[in-house]
């Protein structure tokens, strides 16, 4: 059974940093791209960032480019999101999502975690 | 404003067929696959349709997807009360450095 468990969320002041983690199990982690998708309270879904199976391809939404860094550790079956210079508009539930096609970066998100809440406020 | 455009709401009665539209452009829907996700209240999104019209195992055949040009649609036939949820279309966009894009979501109400 595929499981994705996010952690690291919390309350943080504007301008500070936070690191999210996603622990994956139930599939061959290093065969699939992984992504972060966020959802602000009462709002829709927004793709944040994605990373290919071997970290060779990485992408970011314009809204986080230059502030967020995605990474993965295939030996630990883990995905990370380093978030710097946080803003109030980054407040959201952050989901970890698995790419749906073997070795393919741009595909559907076939499994999602339950999310970790990030609140940016003074 | 979302890159993909969906109606904010839709509704139907049990047993009816409803469709939800998703409009994009040549750089996203026009040149890439469309995906649909269902988000039940208080839960994480779930993949409903991939590659325009393919259903993952376990998704009932009451759900179907289609694409034409720069638009796509999700159809739900035999509407059931448990279909009440938010529905999002998504695609990859070639003009935005290959970013993923979502529609703003459609809240489906079963009357």
Image (spheres, coloured by chain):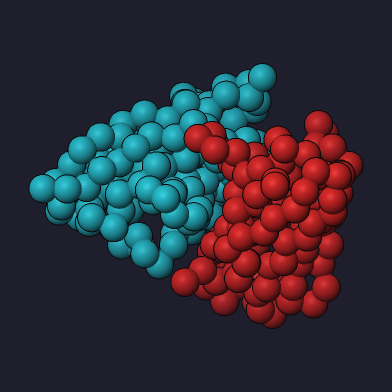
Chain colours: A cyan, B red
Q: How many marks?
A: 0
Residue at the far left in the pictured view: A122
State which quadrant residue A17 falls in: top left
Give residue B40's position: percent from left, percent from top.
60, 38
User: Is residue A103 among the parts visible in the rendering?
Assistant: no
Query: Which is nearer the eye, A26 or B90?
Result: B90
- Vertical side of A101 occupied by A2: above or below: above
Query: A39 left or right of B10?
Result: left
State which quadrant residue A72 falls in: top left
- Vertical side of B50 occupied by A112: above or below: above
Query: A32 left or right of A10?
Result: right
- Vertical side of A50 occupied by B91: above or below: below
Query: Which is nearer the eye, A90 or A81?
Result: A90
Q: Residue at x 25, y 43 (%)?
A: A119
Q: Residue at x 55, y 71 (%)?
A: B3
Give residue B77's position: percent from left, percent from top.
86, 49
Give residue B83's position: percent from left, percent from top.
71, 41
User: Is residue A15 among the parts visible in the rendering?
Assistant: yes
Quadrant including the N terminus of chain A: top right
Query: Which is nearer the eye, A87 or B98?
Result: A87
Q: Residue at x 66, y 43 (%)?
A: B84
């Amino acid at each position: 059974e595929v499981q994705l468990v996010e952690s690291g969320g919390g309350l943080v002041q504007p301008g500070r940093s936070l690191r999210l983690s996603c622990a994956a199990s139930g599939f061959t982690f290093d065969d699939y791209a992984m992504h972060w998708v966020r959802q602000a309270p009462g709002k829709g879904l927004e793709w944040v960032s994605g990373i290919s199976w071997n970290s060779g391809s990485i992408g970011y939404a314009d809204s986080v480019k230059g502030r967020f860094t995605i990474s993965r550790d295939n030996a630990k079956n883990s995905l990370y999101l380093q978030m710097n210079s946080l803003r109030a508009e980054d407040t959201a539930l952050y989901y970890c999502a698995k790419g749906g096609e073997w070795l393919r970066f741009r595909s559907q998100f076939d499994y999602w975690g339950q999310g970790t809440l990030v609140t940016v406020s003074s | 404003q979302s890159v993909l455009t969906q109606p904010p709401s839709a509704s139907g009665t049990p047993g009816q067929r409803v469709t939800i539209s998703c409009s994009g452009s040549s750089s996203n829907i026009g040149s890439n696959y469309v995906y649909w996700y269902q988000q039940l209240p208080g839960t994480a999104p779930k993949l409903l349709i991939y590659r325009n019209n393919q259903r993952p195992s376990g998704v009932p055949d009451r759900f179907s997807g289609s694409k034409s040009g720069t638009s796509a649609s999700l159809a739900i036939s035999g509407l059931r009360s448990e279909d009440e949820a938010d529905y999002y279309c998504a695609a990859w966009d070639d003009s935005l450095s290959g970013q993923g894009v979502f529609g703003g979501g459609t809240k489906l109400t079963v009357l």
